[in-house]
């Protein structure tokens, strides 16, 4: 069990990492007024644990599980229910679930009565290593991801690996997508991943590497909480292409698309002599350790067109954050036609 403090400009966030943190910190939350947001899958598995921890009568919204719940209508439904349940300005919203729950509950907490306390209890590997930390909240609108949102730091994050035990292989793979991204940003994480390719899904290894990823993210968010100076942008490595493919194909989940995006963007980085040699091979190997095979996409140029929605873009160019060297990344800016040509070339070689 280890704690980390994220000293963001707007507020401090305490992150409790490791086995036993749920038991140690969650019960205390119910000493005050709480409102829980969760989803149908998580509630089905953990409802007894929630009753034991928060009592058998806590107010709760149970969203249908899945990305399509991240809507404005569900946000309003949560806020209305909080009002109906008599939630006060001093209440705490507890986001108990994966990235979708964390994003929408965080947004509700930031809006209700101009902001109430927020605690994140991430239950997926992806939300533990990335989305529950750093204060980004959002819902989607008109098919565009995260278009309504705020920066709002949770007061606490309880990242307990006990929740990883009920995840499917695919959910673990999704979390590993973000973990490999951290490997491309942080020399220490890269070395650990490289040394442990045979045990990437081991519970103890995941507990250890989760702490490292959160520590990396906390450092970046402290320096650039609102994504303004360019530092936080690095956390989007692989995401430009990942998001574009995700918007177009929609068949896989976020973490898998991040890995596929990293693979394509690494190809571009190699072509432009930004990354290469053994390091590029090592990153490719890590991607393939998790994903086994990069899917061959027909119509990749149509998917590439979705990259224009990426929020990093400036001056009509597509911005990519790519691996450069151990612990270092670089930003590439390409016209949409150059970018599309590279993706097509890479797809042909698969
Ligand atoms: N997941 C990227 C960020 O929090 O900035």
Image (cartoon, rainbow, N blue to C red):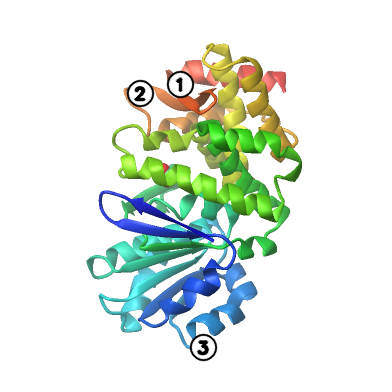
Q: Is residue 120 above or below residue 296?
A: below
Q: Note whether ligand 1 is within 8 Å of mark 2.
A: no
Residue that badge 2 annotates: 316
SS for dot 2: loop
Q: Residue at x 30, y 62 (%)?
A: 110
Structural distance between the alpha carbons of marks 2 and 1: 8 Å
SS for dot 3: loop
Mark 1, Cα crowd under 10 Å, few <14 / some 14-19 / many 20+, is: some
Residue 327 numbered tag: none
The answer to whether the residues at label 2 and label 1 have Cβ atoms under 8 Å apart is yes
Structural distance between the alpha carbons of marks 3 and 2: 53 Å
**Which of the image's four quarters has the N terminus?**
bottom right
**Residue 52, percent from left and from top:** 56, 84
Residue that badge 3 annotates: 56
Q: Quadrant of residue 102?
A: bottom left
Q: Quadrant of residue 219?
A: top left
Viewer-closest of 309 and 159: 159
Viewer-closest of 7 and 91: 7
Residue that badge 1 annotates: 336
* Of callouts 3 and 2, the N-terminal one: 3
Q: Residue at x 59, y 44 (%)?
A: 255
SS for dot 1: helix
Closer to us: mark 3 or mark 2?
Answer: 3
Determine the quadrant in which ligand 1 lies. Answer: top left
**Which of the image's four quarters has the C terminus?**
top right
């Amino acid at each position: 069990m280890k704690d980390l403090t994220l000293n963001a400009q707007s507020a401090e966030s305490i992150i409790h990492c490791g086995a036993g943190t749920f038991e140690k910190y969650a019960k205390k939350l119910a000493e005050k007024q709480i409102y829980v947001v969760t989803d149908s899958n998580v509630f089905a598995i953990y409802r007894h644990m929630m009753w034991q921890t928060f009592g058998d009568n806590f107010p709760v919204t149970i969203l249908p599980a899945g990305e399509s719940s991240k809507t404005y209508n569900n946000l309003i439904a949560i806020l209305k229910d909080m009002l109906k349940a008599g939630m006060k300005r001093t209440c705490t919203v507890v986001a108990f679930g994966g990235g979708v729950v964390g994003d929408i509950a965080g947004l509700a907490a930031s809006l209700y009565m101009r902001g109430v306390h927020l605690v994140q209890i991430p239950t997926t590997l992806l939300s533990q290593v990335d989305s529950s930390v750093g204060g980004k909240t959002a819902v989607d609108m008109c098919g565009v991801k995260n278009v309504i949102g705020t920066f709002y730091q949770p007061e606490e994050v309880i990242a307990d690996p006990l929740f990883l035990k009920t995840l499917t292989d695919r959910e673990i793979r999704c979390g590993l997508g973000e973990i490999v991204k951290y490997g491309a940003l942080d020399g220490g994480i890269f070395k650990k991943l490289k040394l442990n390719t045979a045990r990437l899904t081991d519970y103890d290894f995941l507990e250890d590497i989760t702490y490292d990823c959160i520590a990396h993210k906390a450092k970046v968010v402290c320096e650039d909480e609102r994504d303004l100076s360019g530092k936080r942008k690095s956390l989007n490595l692989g995401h430009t292409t990942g998001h574009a493919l995700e918007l177009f194909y929609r068949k896989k989940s976020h973490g898998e698309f991040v890995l596929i995006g990293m693979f394509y963007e690494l190809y571009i980085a190699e072509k432009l002599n930004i990354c290469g040699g053994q390091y590029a091979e090592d990153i490719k190997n890590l991607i393939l350790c998790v994903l086994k095979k990069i899917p061959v996409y027909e119509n990749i140029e149509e998917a590439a067109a979705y990259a224009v929605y990426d929020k990093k873009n400036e001056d009509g160019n597509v911005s990519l954050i790519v691996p450069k060297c151990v612990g270092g990344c670089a930003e590439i800016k390409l016209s949409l036609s150059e970018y599309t040509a590279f993706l097509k070339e890479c797809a042909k070689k698969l």
